[in-house]
């Protein structure tokens, strides 16, 4: 079964750092772009970051630019989100999401179950 | 950033009803629009991509339409398992942006 499993969430103080990981299985990880999407408690979905299959293209939401870094290791089939200078408003469930292409159309078709990040003193 | 305005924010309907949810983009996004369903405590699930392409395994009662700035998700005959929150997402340009969500509740 195609699967994404996030880990690394937890409680961190404002200004602190956290490293989220996502382990991929049962698909050719190196052929797919990847994303992080988050959801604050009781709120809607917010796209956070994108990385292309070969890491040549990376994008961030304005709200995290300069603080978060996305990376991947295709040999290890893993995706990472390094989060620095964390703020209260970064509190959310973070989802690892696979991107796919059909013809020229892009879509996010496989989601992990999410990992919870809580930023609080 | 492209703003996605989704309406209504909530909707009450009955099993068997036909339901329509709309999303308006602040600029032309061609057909780069997807729809996602989320149930409480669960990850979102892709329903439709590229405006009208049904994701594998999604029932045919779900359909999408539109282009440019105006898009629609239609559920032709609501089933009990369809009561959930629905989001649109534009993946035309970064930052990708979601609509605010539509919570579909049982009347």
Image (cartoon, rainbow, N blue to C red):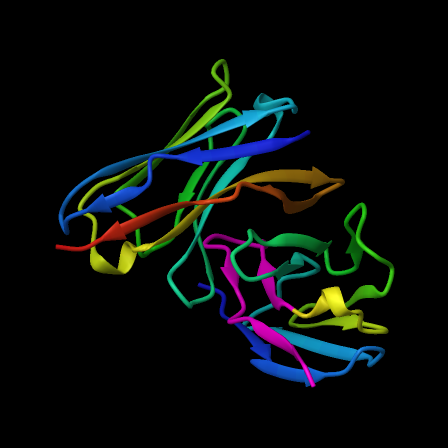
Indicate the position of residue A27 as horizontal and vertical percent values.
65, 24
Relative to B60, residue A58 above or below: above
Count of numbered badges drawn on the protein: 0
Percent position of residue B54, x then y:
80, 54
B38 and A64: which one is in front? B38
Q: Is residue B5 left or right of residue A116?
A: right
Outermost residue toward the top? Answer: A75
Closer to the camera, B83 or A63?
A: B83
- As drawn, is A103 to the left or to the right of A90? right
Which residue is located at x 79 percent, y 53 percent? Answer: B58
At 50% across and 55% down in the image, what residue appears? B96
Q: What stretch is highlighted in magenta?
A: B84-107
Which residue is at a point 33% across and 35% down the rendered structure image? A8
Query: Where in the figure is residue A25, as x and y percent of width and height?
Result: 59, 24
Q: In which quarter of the image is the C terminus of chain A?
A: bottom left
B95 versus B14 height, above or below:
above
Decide: is A73 above or below B75: above
Q: Please tell me in which quadrant of the rendered image residue B20 appears.
A: bottom right
Magenta region includes residue B18: no
Report the residue at 56% width, 70% height from top. Answer: B27
Residue B8 visible at all = no
Residue B86 lies in magenta, yes or no?
yes
Side of B55 where A79 appears, left or right: left
């Amino acid at each position: 079964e195609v699967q994404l499993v996030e880990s690394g969430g937890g409680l961190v103080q404002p200004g602190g750092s956290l490293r989220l990981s996502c382990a991929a299985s049962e698909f050719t990880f190196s052929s797919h772009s990847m994303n992080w999407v988050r959801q604050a408690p009781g709120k809607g979905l917010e796209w956070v970051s994108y990385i292309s299959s070969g890491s040549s293209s990376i994008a961030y939401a304005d709200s995290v630019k300069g603080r978060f870094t996305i990376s991947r290791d295709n040999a290890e089939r893993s995706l990472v989100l390094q989060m620095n200078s964390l703020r209260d408003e970064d509190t959310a469930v973070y989802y690892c999401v696979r991107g796919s292409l059909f013809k020229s159309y892009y879509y996010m078709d496989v989601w992990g179950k999410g990992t919870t990040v809580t930023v609080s003193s | 950033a492209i703003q996605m305005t989704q309406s209504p924010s909530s909707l009450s309907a009955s099993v068997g009803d036909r339901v329509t949810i709309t999303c308006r983009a602040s600029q032309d996004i061609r057909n780069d629009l997807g729809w996602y369903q989320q149930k409480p405590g669960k990850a979102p699930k892709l329903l439709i991509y590229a405006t009208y392409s049904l994701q594998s395994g999604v029932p045919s009662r779900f359909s999408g339409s539109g282009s440019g700035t105006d898009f629609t998700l239609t559920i032709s005959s609501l089933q009990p398992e369809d009561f959930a929150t629905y989001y649109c997402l534009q993946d035309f340009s970064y930052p990708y942006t979601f609509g605010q969500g539509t919570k579909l509740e049982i009347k």
